């Protein structure tokens, strides 16, 4: 017999999961999850974990609750750690209490891991405090969708109408007019502030604000559908001053990242922090060349190279992995001058114990050449670990000026075996190398880029776009990931002014 963990996944924003919740997701043998769980949380599952979707949407149950209960019991008898992952908090209108009862009745050990409920998180992301010394001293959470088996409602509408200052209804969009009518009939003023918040805490968040008297009309006109919460109270007025989530510079912009999956995280985080809805559309798979006798020979004779050039973080990672496997470390490079192509590569080198001797002003191969112009390369030997296919202008410069350069391919950049289907057209597609341009067109076709803004990391990538008949609407002035994000932000700000 295993143990069941009823885990609250939070309101939607990936980073609002608790540390304990994330720890259990990483340990789980089985994860049984709902519709409102951010699917990216499943990226943290351990390899081999069984993932089961039992999502429940308005008017549609993927699996009825009794069947979910039986499924949890069955999986607990077969596995050690079973995580029941539920949107928001398990005990706030999440039927977690019912599932815990079933587990207790069957003698199955369980733990409850609270989550941040949408009842408090979603208003906060809309800039609405549920309590405020001047507006609200009391707050109530109410289901907007009672058990259909009930003969009569157990909600005391007159007490609600005259009682708590702030009312938060969950799952009530379909019953909005009924909620409005009952509150007004019970004595709540039609002029009370009211709003609906759809897909709260996520990039698609939408807020419709008005009064209790007209909120149902506004919601219908704006096409608000579940999932959404209803908020009623004069604290709604504070949104005009405290709105922050939707005010971020890239809010609502769907931005596609075409880098390899393991390289997309930093760009994705920077865009998400600025409000973008990030679409991951990887066009490259990085595969180390193994076995690699040429790399091993280079490492065995590393002392013979006065200069080592790194033109990507991939080359740094693979080179040092091979160095460490051979029982050597950063001290093996003590006699060499190390030149990275840019800040990200330099930072990774520092994490390996190497402080670069140079850093180009422009983060391209041309920038490296500008550094080489300050060095007498005649008679010097250079080592260049890099991709199997790459531009040769650095090698040509060294040879043209009397030096020698040993090029060691350490990885291949290939097309993914499967592509991410395009469920929604991006507003902006980002390209961080010529390979991402060529591969994107090969995978998705030129038509995908029509009527879409294109953001390029620098002139080399822009040139490749031009060769394929496309204009880069946005080009980074500093040819790295922060520079690209800055350029996108400036462009979007400029268009909105």
Image (cartoon, grey):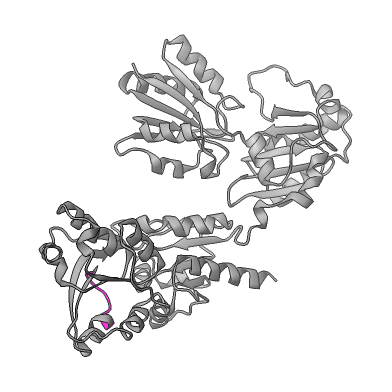
Specify whether 104 is left or right of 415.
right
The structure residue drawn at horizontal position 28% and vertical position 58%, both measured from the top left corner, is 317
Specify whether 92 is left or right of 405.
right
Choose between 35 and 44: the one closer to the eye. 44
Quarter assignment of residue 131: top right
Quadrant location, the C terminus: bottom right
Specify whether 64 is left or right of 52.
right
The structure residue drawn at horizontal position 28% and vertical position 57%, both measured from the top left corner, is 417
List x then y, in percent, for residue 40.
45, 45
List x then y, in percent, for residue 471.
48, 80
Choose between 10 and 220: the one closer to the eye. 10
List x then y, in percent, for residue 185.
87, 29
**Residue 375 seen in render:** yes
The structure residue drawn at horizontal position 39% and vertical position 56%, both measured from the top left corner, is 420
**Residue 423 seen in render:** no
Q: Is residue 389 magenta?
A: yes
Quarter assignment of residue 149: top right
Q: How many numbered marks have been drawn onto this rendered protein structure?
A: 0
Q: Bounds of the magenta span? A: 387-393
List x then y, in percent, for residue 228.
65, 41
Q: Is residue 373 magenta?
A: no
Looking at the image, residue 281 lies above or below residue 215: below
Looking at the image, residue 148 lies above or below residue 213: above
Quadrant location, the N terminus: top left
Q: From the image, give the main secondary structure of the stretch colored magenta.
A: loop
């Amino acid at each position: 017999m295993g143990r069941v963990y009823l885990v609250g996944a939070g309101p939607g924003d990936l980073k609002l999961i608790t540390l304990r919740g994330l720890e259990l997701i990483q340990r789980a043998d089985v994860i049984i999850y709902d519709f409102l769980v951010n699917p990216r949380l499943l990226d943290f599952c351990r390899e081999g974990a069984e993932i089961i979707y039992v999502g429940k949407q308005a008017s549609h149950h993927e699996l009825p609750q009794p069947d979910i209960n039986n499924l949890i019991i069955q999986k607990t008898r077969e596995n050690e750690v079973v995580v029941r992952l539920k949107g928001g908090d398990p005990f706030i209108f999440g039927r977690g209490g019912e599932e815990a009862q079933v587990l207790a009745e069957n003698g199955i050990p369980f733990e409850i891991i609270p989550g941040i409920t949408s009842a408090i998180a979603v208003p906060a992301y809309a800039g609405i405090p549920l309590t405020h010394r001047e507006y609200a001293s009391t707050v109530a959470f109410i289901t907007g969708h009672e058990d259909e088996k009930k003969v009569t409602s157990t909600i005391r509408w007159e007490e609600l109408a005259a009682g708590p200052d702030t009312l938060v209804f969950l799952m009530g969009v379909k019953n909005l007019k009924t909620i409005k009518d009952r509150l007004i009939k019970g004595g709540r003023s039609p002029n009370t502030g009211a709003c609906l918040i759809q897909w709260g805490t996520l990039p698609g968040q939408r807020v419709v604000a008005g009064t209790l008297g007209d909120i149902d009309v506004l919601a219908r006109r704006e096409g608000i559908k579940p999932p959404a919460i209803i908020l009623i109270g004069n604290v709604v007025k504070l949104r005009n001053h405290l709105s922050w989530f939707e005010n971020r510079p890239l809010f609502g912009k769907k931005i596609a990242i075409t880098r390899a999956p393991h390289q997309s995280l930093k760009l994705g985080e920077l865009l998400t922090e600025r409000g973008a809805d990030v679409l991951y559309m990887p066009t490259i798979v990085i595969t180390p060349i193994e076995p690699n006798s040429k790399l091993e020979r280079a490492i065995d004779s590393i002392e013979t190279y006065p200069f080592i050039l790194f033109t990507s973080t991939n080359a740094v990672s693979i080179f040092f992995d091979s160095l460490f496997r051979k029982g050597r470390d950063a001290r093996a490079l003590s006699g060499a001058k190390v030149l990275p192509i840019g800040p990200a590569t330099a930072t990774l080198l520092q994490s390996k114990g190497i402080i670069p001797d140079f850093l180009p002003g422009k983060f391209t191969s041309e920038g490296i050449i500008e550094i080489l112009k300050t060095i007498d390369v005649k008679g010097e030997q250079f080592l260049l670990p890099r991709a199997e296919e790459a531009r040769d202008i650095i090698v040509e410069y060294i040879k043209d000026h009397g030096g020698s350069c040993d090029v060691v391919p350490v990885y291949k950049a290939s097309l993914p075996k499967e592509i991410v289907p395009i469920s929604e057209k991006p507003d902006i597609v980002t390209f961080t190398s010529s390979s991402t341009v060529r591969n994107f067109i090969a995978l998705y076709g030129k038509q995908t880029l029509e009527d879409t803004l294109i953001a390029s990391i620098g002139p080399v990538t822009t040139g490749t776009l031009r060769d394929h008949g496309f204009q880069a609407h946005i080009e980074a002035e500093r040819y790295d990931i922060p520079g690209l994000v800055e350029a996108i932000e400036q462009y979007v700000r400029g268009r909105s002014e």
